[in-house]
Amino acid sequence: MRIGRRLAALVGALLLALPLAGCGEPSTEDYCAQLRLDREKLADMVSVGSPTALLDNLELLQGLAEKAPSDLTDEWQTFLGALEDLDAALRSADVSAEDFEGGEPPPGLARADRDAVVAAADQIRSEEVVGAASGIEQQGRDVCKVNLGL
């Protein structure tokens, strides 16, 4: 009877571990390794100070989000969602962020397009998105020892 209980306990432990090992969860180590590989690109992106720096590097950021551990999923979705919304609004209006000199829309831009771009830009500055970026930055600094500068 002891062998049966031990076998049952072992099988139970194995079954509990399988979802963790087999689900394809990105590992923190892989994420940190990618941050280290992209450290120079990230630093350049932040130091440029261009209003389009994040949008110009959207693919890089999306790649990082794909490798992020599950405890950062919500933060990356919030952060990228805001950037993707702004990108979509700019594309829909057929303008770029640089076209908004001094915060003023380019001449001839339809009011609906202007409103959509302004709303998307405001979303990026929202408490929720800033908080998400802070969480991503904090994880990078504390766990991966990489300063993202978001």
Image (tube, rainbow, N blue to C red):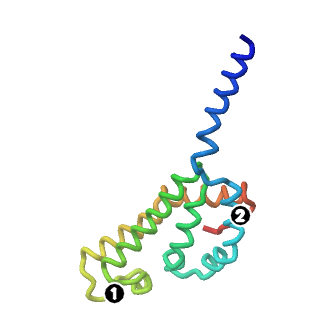
* Residue 106: image location, x then y, percent: 33, 87
Sequence-wise first label, 1 or 2: 2
* Residue 133: image location, x then y, percent: 56, 61
* Residue 146: image location, x then y, percent: 72, 64
- Local crowd size for mark 2, using a 10 Å CA cut-off: few (<14), some (14–19), many (≥20): some
- Marks 1 and 2, how far apart in space? 42 Å
Q: Is residue 35 left or right of residue 75?
A: right
Is 147 located above or below residue 131 in the figure?
below
Q: Is residue 122 left or right of residue 149?
A: left
Instruction: Residue at 70%, 26% (x, y): give it.
Output: 10
Instruction: Residue at 40%, 71% (x, y): give it.
Output: 86
- Local crowd size for mark 1, using a 10 Å CA cut-off: few (<14), some (14–19), many (≥20): some
Instruction: Residue at 56%, 61% (x, y): give it.
Output: 65
Q: Nearer the viewer, residue 111 or 56?
A: 56
Residue picked out by circle 1 = 106
Q: Amino acid at mark 1?
A: Pro
Q: Amino acid at mark 2?
A: Ala
Is 100 located above or below residue 68 in the figure?
below
Is 25 located above or below residue 14 in the figure?
below
Direction bottom: furthest residue: 107
